[in-house]
Amino acid sequence: MKRLIVLLLALAVLAGLGEGVTSKAAPASISIWTLWAGGEEANFKVVLAAFTARTGIEVTHVAQTSEGLKVALPAALMAGTAPADVACMPWAGLIKDLAKEGFLMEVTDLVDETEFSPDILNWVTVDGVLYGVPYKVGI
């Protein structure tokens, strides 16, 4: 079964365009689900275009609703399919639950953990394994 990468980071960081992340061999195309629509989606598409220009990797962005990420995504994973390669979502608890169920890909080797606060990374770490990187934090 294909595992989903659920990250709390911008796609550019995943590709190694940001600080603290190393790049691995990547597929020729990927899909990403986010909650971003409207102006946020327009801005994100600028980032995606720069990502594609730099890496040659085509990206299909699918703007989702909260229900799409909270309900449809876990249901698809439980049915044995990963409808997206990457998902940006703001729910650390859901990320941890999906990781514990074996649905997510480990990203420990992709991230230089010294570039981030350990407290922040604990939000997306299960049993010492990193499954995401927060890209935005509000308190």
Image (tube, helix red, strand yellow):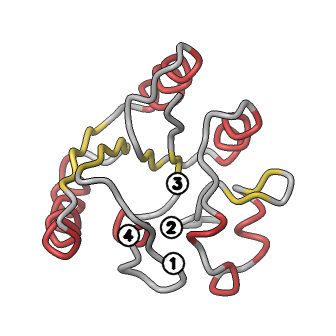
Foreground disc of the pair 2, 4? 4
Foreground disc of the pair 2, 1? 1
SS class, disc 4: loop
Q: Which residue lies furthest to the top in this view?
A: 79
Tell me the distance, in whole angstroms, between the alpha carbons under discs 2 and 1: 12 Å
Tell me the distance, in whole angstroms, between the alpha carbons under discs 4 and 1: 8 Å
Tell me the distance, in whole angstroms, between the alpha carbons under discs 3 and 1: 13 Å
Amino acid type indicated by mark 4: Ala
Q: Name the residue under label 2.
A: 135
Tell me the distance, in whole angstroms, between the alpha carbons under discs 2 and 4: 14 Å
Which corner quadrant of the image does residue 48 belong to? bottom left
Q: Mark 4 points at which residue?
A: 15
Query: Is 20 located above or below residue 60 in the figure?
Result: below
- Residue 120, percent from left and from top: 71, 69
Is mark 4 in CB contact (under 8 Å) with mark 1?
yes
Q: Name the residue under label 1.
A: 21
Foreground disc of the pair 2, 3? 3
Q: Going 68% across and 78% down the picture, which residue do you hit? A: 113
Amino acid type indicated by mark 3: Leu
Query: Is 89 located above or below residue 115 in the figure?
Result: above
Is tag 3's residue or tag 1's residue first in the polypeptide sequence?
Answer: 3
Amino acid type indicated by mark 1: Val
Is mark 2 in CB contact (under 8 Å) with mark 3?
yes
Amino acid type indicated by mark 2: Tyr
Q: What's the mark number on residue 7?
A: 3
Tell me the distance, in whole angstroms, between the alpha carbons under discs 2 and 3: 9 Å
